[in-house]
Amino acid sequence: MRRLAQELDTGPASLYVYVRNTAELHAAVLDELLGTVESPPADQGDWRERLEKVLTSYTGVLFEYRGLAQSALVARPSGEHYLNLVERLLTLLDEGGVPPGQAAWGVDLLLQVATATAAEHAVQDRAAGAQDDWDALAHALQNASGDTHPRIASLADELLAGTPKARMTWGFQMLINGILHTPTPTST
Amino acid sequence: MRRLAQELDTGPASLYVYVRNTAELHAAVLDELLGTVESPPADQGDWRERLEKVLTSYTGVLFEYRGLAQSALVARPSGEHYLNLVERLLTLLDEGGVPPGQAAWGVDLLLQVATATAAEHAVQDRAAGAQDDWDALAHALQNASGDTHPRIASLADELLAGTPKARMTWGFQMLINGILHTPTPTST
DNA sequence: ACCTGAACACCGTTCAAGT
DNA sequence: ACCTGAACACCGTTCAAGT
């Protein structure tokens, strides 16, 4: 708030005429940003590929504005661009023959994972200590004792394998398959 | 840091003898808390049910300490209790016949979703404005025009349906199915 | 060596007072 | 009615000075 106020050559109090608090400001900026999420045309790849592209573009947008990804995990946007994004995802899932109930609940999770992924990466390459944390985790996994943690010991390489991009792509495919294969309690 | 220092009857500077920064403090507290995650005995339900129970207990623990859920999304713990939890999840997935590579990548996503879910709920019932945000979203979905957002218009009820608990359970089942059905690029 | 008081450089939010 | 200066109540982190 203070930084924005300074940019606008005024005191921070003035902003409270337009927004109720920081969360509302974040939500407004977020919705604006969602307008820039790319969405590939219908003739380009099947529905899975296009769905993946939309989600990847979404994480890309959040990632560009590091700070926002964190608040997006908690901010419940309800602006026009958010609705457009949800509509787009529902349409793609419908194209893939996903039952409506599963699509409805699935959209939430798709966006949650996409947002959390962006937040994780954003923090990881900003904060200085984050790299150390990751090193510590890698070290802990690689040095896990076969006696106390046999599974980790034998899977250490796999746990750390793959580029962030590859893991994200797998994550989206995995979610799509899960949504496709899991009936909701109401869809009897 | 200041609150903790006060609790310990000292100045905030003293804490920096034991931790490097707030993130490190959060990570340490988090690992301690992970020691209280319940994990059902082998004779109680099949592997899916037990996996679900562990994850539900994990979100419960994070939810109890509201503030921590948010930092857990970003903190990369590497303590003993974290390793125990990962080992437990890997063991359950192996019991279900999930190929090792998929299990390794899947554990990450399971914990990510569980953490993000806890963080969302924690914020939602704390901050005063959060309820308003949710109302605004519900209103936006229910009043979506059939012209511009036909999918949302016809699925509004389903998008908002279900208790948080029911949706979380479905989410875990969906993830398990996804992990089970999605080969990793390396598992040729 | 181990600890810490005091200061530095920030925050978000409120409210009385201005125009 | 619309705006804002100044203050309030917080943060995390550093560092010179103490024991």
Image: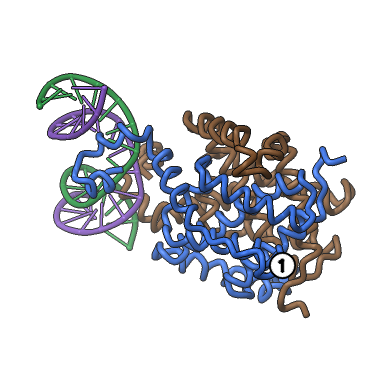
Chain colours: A brown, B blue, C purple, D green
**The C terminus of chain B, quarter of image:** top right
Q: Taking A11 as reference, is A103 left or right?
A: right
At mark 1, the secondary structure is loop
Residue B120 placement (x, y as % from top left): 52, 59
- Residue located 71% across and 72% down the image: B155
- Residue located 54% across and 39% down the image: A66
Q: Nearer the viewer, residue B140 or A23?
A: A23
Q: Nearer the viewer, residue A63 or A112?
A: A112
Categorize mark 1 by other alpha carbons within 10 Å: few (<14), some (14-19), many (20+): few
Residue B144 placement (x, y as % from top left): 65, 70
Q: Nearer the viewer, residue B149 or B32?
A: B32
**The N terminus of chain B, quarter of image:** top left
- Residue located 45% across and 43% down the image: B27
The amino acid at mark 1 is: Asp
Residue A19 placement (x, y as % from top left): 41, 56
Q: Which residue is mark 1?
A: B46
Residue A160 placement (x, y as % from top left): 67, 36
Q: Nearer the viewer, residue B22 or B156?
A: B22
